Image: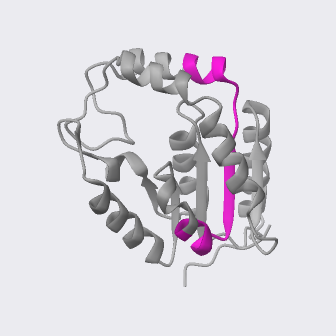
Amino acid sequence: MPEMRRVMIIGQPGSGKSTLARTLGGITHLPVVHIDHIHWKPGWVERPGPEKDALCAEVHARETWIFEGGRSVTWPERLARADSVIWLDLPLAKRLWRVLWRTVRYWGRTRPDLPEGCPEKLSWTFLRWIWDTRHTSRDAMQALYRSVPADKSKFHLRGNRDVEQFLSGLRIAASTGNLGISHR
């Protein structure tokens, strides 16, 4: 496995970015950053764009991270600093099911990937946004993924089996000391 110090995870809502980031953090012991902690303040108050950009830049400057999520205007800087890119590219039906399931699972409580004071709720606006951006958002991620320089590791995971195989490989590498993670 190549060295992993800064891992960029992208994917559309419900693709499993937060779950993968937490699991990957547990294996690698790298710090995990969820974009929703940057996007939202407590009480579902959205931060202004320049503030989000500055917070993303602070994360990008760190020596190590697993950074999951959007804020596509900051992707070029994130990609420049990342050594690994993971694209979770799951079908729309699977993603919608996961969004609905997590809504039921966390209803009225704050998910681990959200700031305190942002209890889970059902938003038809959000569901509509997932539907409306299903092609444009995927196209943007595909373009980013294709632009990943050859000196960086990249992983295109299209379903549960791909994710499990990826994580299994990391667990094996970690157990044999061949994970290539440096915490310099």
62, above or below 73, in the image: below
- Residue 86 x/y as whole percent: 68, 52
Report the colour scheme: one colour
Indicate yes or no whether the magenta region holds residue 95. yes
Q: Quadrant of residue 81?
A: bottom right
Front-most of residues 172 and 152: 152
Vertical arrangement, residue 109 with respect to residue 136, above or below = above
- The quarter holding residue 171 reads bottom right
Left of 124 or right of it: where is 7? right
Q: Is residue 9 visible?
A: yes
**Is residue 117 toward the left or the right of residue 163 in the image?**
left
Residue shown at the point (54%, 40%) measured from the top left: 19
Answer left or right for 174 relative to 102: right
Quarter of the image containing the N terminus?
A: bottom right
**Measured from the top left, where is residue 139 in percent x and y?**
68, 41
Q: Is residue 130 above or below residue 62?
A: above
Q: Which part of the image, by quadrant, shows the C terminus?
A: bottom right
Between 169 and 116, the one lying in front of the other is: 116
Q: Which residues are magenta?
A: 77-97
Q: Which residue is depicted at the point 33% across and 58% down?
A: 52
Asked whether 154 or 167 is in front, the reply is: 154
Q: Is residue 102 visible?
A: no
Residue 94: which quarter of the image? top right
Tell which residue pokes out farthest to the bottom in this image: 184
Place of residue 5 in the rendered image (x, y in percent of width and height, measured from the top left): 60, 72
- On the image, the x and y values in percent for residue 57 come to 41, 70
Q: Residue shown at 35%/34% (left/top)?
A: 111
Number of marks in the image? Answer: 0
Tell me: residue 38, above or below residue 122: below
Is residue 58 covered in magenta?
A: no
